[in-house]
Amino acid sequence: MTTYAFAAVLFTLGIAGMALLPNLLRKLLAMNVMQVAVIVFFVSLAFKDGATVPILGQGGDPQAAEFMNPLPHTLMLTAIVVSVSTTGLALGLLVRIRSRFETLNERQLLDKLR
Amino acid sequence: MAEGHLISIGLLAAMVVSAACALAVKDLLTAAALFGAFSFLTATWFALLGAVDVAFTEACVGGALTTILFVSTAFRTSRRFD
Amino acid sequence: MGAPRHGGTRMRWLLGAAAFPALFLGLVLGMAELPEFGDPGSPASTHVSPRFIEDAAAETGAANMVTAVLADYRGYDTLGETAVIFAAGLGCLVILAAAGGRPNPPAPGMSHPFGSVILDTATRILVPVVLLFAVYVLIHGHISPGGGFQGGVLFGSGLIMMRLVWGPAHEGGTHRPDVTAFGPSLRGSLILACAGILGYAGIGLAAMAFGGEFLNYGTLPLGSDPAHVRELATLGIEAAVFLTVAGTVGVLFDTISIGMRESGVPLGSDRGPRE
Amino acid sequence: MRDVLPGLLVALPLVGAALVPLLAALFRRTTRAAALALHAAIFAAALGLFWSAAVAGPIRYAVGGWPGPWGIELWFDGLSTLIAVLVAGMACFASFAQTFGPDPDRTAPGSTPLREGLLRGALLLLVGGLLGIVATRDVFNLFVFLEISSLAAYTLVASGGGRSTVAAFRYLLAGTAAGSLYLFGVGFLYALTGTLNMDDLAARLPSVEADAALTVAVVLIAVGLSIKAALFPLHGWLPDTYVYTPTPAAGFIAAVMAKVSAYALLRLLGEVLAGTDAGAVVLEIMIWLGVAGVVAGGVLAVAQRAVTRMLAWSSISAMGMILIGVGMGSALAITGALFHMAAHALAKGCLFFGAGGIRALEDGDEVDRWAGLGSRAPWTLAALTVAGLSMIGIPPTAGFFSKYYLLSASITAGGPAGIAAFAAIILSSLLATVYFLRVLEAAWFRAPAEAERASSAAPAGPVLPRPLALPVVGLALLIVLTGIFARPFERHVLPDWETGTARIAAEAP
């Protein structure tokens, strides 16, 4: 529960930052924090007491209780890729926006768009 | 590892602090560095929970690639948040 | 964009002050009812995932269960993931490289490029190691942590490291003109990324041609032991992911660090734009 | 055929998305023929699946040969194949429109063959993402394809440069927040049930006892998808995105993108989570938000002077109407919602292709710019008029029947929500009359201003270039055909919601 709550803290921090920070680059940092929060949540779901890394050692008959749940790990690999892809595309957009409007501040940008 | 494991809680708290700092500082390079630290802390925590693949990827992507991309953007836009 | 400016911001803070604590409280209230952290008897640990732990090695030939799920049981997700990162590369090319406009000048306080003897030597030693390690990570993916994605990012990062020290491949006139040509051009990176997606989907379609479902590697005529066939095919798709990721990382870094260029120039750096 | 088409439908767009830029990069020639052929093939696959699902029943397809809940399953019933046909068909028109040029303000591809190839690749990727959402039976896989479609859409939106990049960035922030909220909700569902397969979820959810956690999951998923579907208070990204997107992409994005998210809402809330208490409450709230969206979208559309912005607000109104149908959940309401998805997609595609082209060629977007267009391009304007009449809901067009079904559903539903929905739909028709007649009156009955006449004396021919005119006229024909054959369309093409649900419940593993 404590662990889950940390994910909630990070998620709220990220999404609030996205909505409230005025600089677009900072919004993007906040977006990354939000995405990491979801990953933290899933990885904590995969944890089992007394289990080990989900890689099979030498032979043996693996039992479900002996290894961490590999499914959330897999899903989160995909989520990390999604997060870096979104960030990359967003940074490209910011370079373009900055070259056209010469600011990355949301308020100044809205003034220029008026 | 029990729920209240000190290393786990400590890492999680450090993650929250570094994330908050990354969002608060004025200088973009500092923010990117703090974000890199946040990612490495997260990766360490993942490794602690036995999610080695996720930890590896988070370290590659969050710690290295995303930070590099943020710095490259700073290079072409503005070093300070305006 | 007609939102009233200052009133709008204050409004947003007020709304945020109400909404985000509510979001946090809601999340925590819901989390209180979830199965205990680390409970081996939780639905997540007992319902679907045991098969991935107990049968993965026999069914897919991968000792790393994460790789087994990633590349085989949920290989379709991974194809989607590869398409996502490809989409990012495509987007940056459209937005920056293939658009009109001038390159942004370097921002104040950021000097460029920053070569020195120490950096130069360190890179010379480090980069080959990183590139080699990337390939190792790719090949070893199904018995140890790693795989195509991590390997691709490492490979791309190795190339980025060179460009950071010696200047981007397309911005001539850096302090080591003899080595700037190393690494793929922007167009080369794009071709790599496309080839990866085509390779991945091609393996999936080949499985259909041999009578299986899309991405059902078991039907490929690569041997008699189904687990071994799946292991080989997994290596194939990991290599495809590697290509796409390495190519896209190159595209992302090049487009973002160069900024905008005159129409068509960076993509045609090896030949001029031909119209 | 049934064991090949599902794989082809999801694989072809992704293959094309890589193949077309590759061809462009290698040969530096136009990729129009390759892209059109791919879109046609995808459309044929969608049609084939639709036919097959209608004749021989729904298709369950285990990708990779792994059955659910371990692997990822695709599911093709009347509902998903209908939306797939809609998406693939609109994509053919959009791909055709992508040859729109020359490029006065870089709003269209064609500057260089490579740029054209990249944009065509992005469109194919968008189609692949949307078809993936439509086909999948796995909640996490839905997230992956949601992100593919989103990233491709950001690319297409931003390809206009200038203001469109700002619009794309805001869309990106909203879309990523939506995706993360949805994924968090999926995490809750996974923690509670241990599965990601929709059938398995529907089977296991009734035995879940954690009400608060389930409520949080449902709310997170509903809010996430509602942002993508532009449900009223969460619609902030939509107007700028639709207005600043280059024309060929705008016609496609405005026509189907939000609707696929509405489809996902229908699948998840109306089917998978339907048995939960929270799901029922969320659907009830959705009706009221839909009512608010219908009214607000209509009023704000009247307030706009620029035609494309007016169309964007009218889209918010239309999405509200679709979500009213989804929220009510009766067979009649779902029929109305699906009918409106089809009718509105056809009409909005037609209008955005037309209005976007006129904006580029007349160099302005105000209603006045449309003055006198009726005499210069009677066929194009006739087509746009048909689309406008369908938006208002005049009888021979498709739009009339969708509103008719939704109105009957509101009467059947009764209660305050039903009355509010009824009133809102009637009001939306009145408001649509106001804002469309203004444009049509300018186009047909007003002479262009004197200065305009002097400059526009030369181009007396058709207003729109062929790549846009053909989609506009073709879509208008489809609107009329759908309207004339509304009854057979409803009976044979639209899926039967009640039996569909029952059949799915019986087949759950």
Image (cartoon, helix red, strand yellow):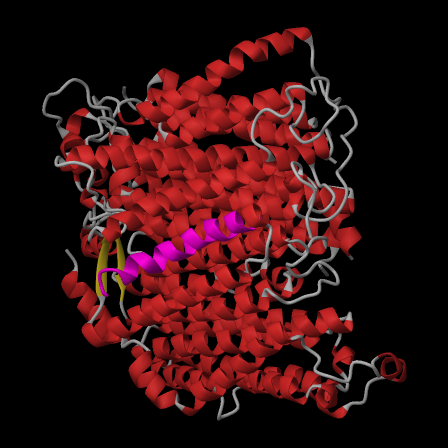
Q: Is residue D66 visible?
A: yes
Q: Is residue D192 magenta?
A: no
Along the line of sight, the residue nearer the viewer: C66 or D128: D128
Along the line of sight, the residue nearer the viewer: C212 or D368: C212
Q: Which residues are magenta?
A: D1-24
User: Residue C165 appears in which quarter of the rendering?
Assistant: top right
Q: Where residue C56 appears, x then y in whole percent?
A: 18, 33
Residue at x 45% of width, y 64% of height: D37
Residue at x 48% of width, y 25% of height: C155
Q: Where residue C272 appears, x then y in whole percent?
A: 70, 42
Along the line of sight, the residue nearer the viewer: D374 or D206: D374
Q: Where residue D111 appears, x then y in whole percent?
A: 68, 56
Q: Is residue D251 above or below residue C213?
A: below
Along the line of sight, the residue nearer the viewer: C81 or C126: C126
Q: Is residue D21 magenta?
A: yes
Q: Is residue D313 left or right of residue D274?
A: right
Q: Is residue D364 above or below residue A40?
A: below
Quadrant showing the N terminus of chain B: top left
State the count of labels.
Answer: 0
Dominant secondary structure (helix, strand or loop) of the stretch shown in magenta: helix
User: Residue C134 appears in which quarter of the rendering?
Assistant: top left
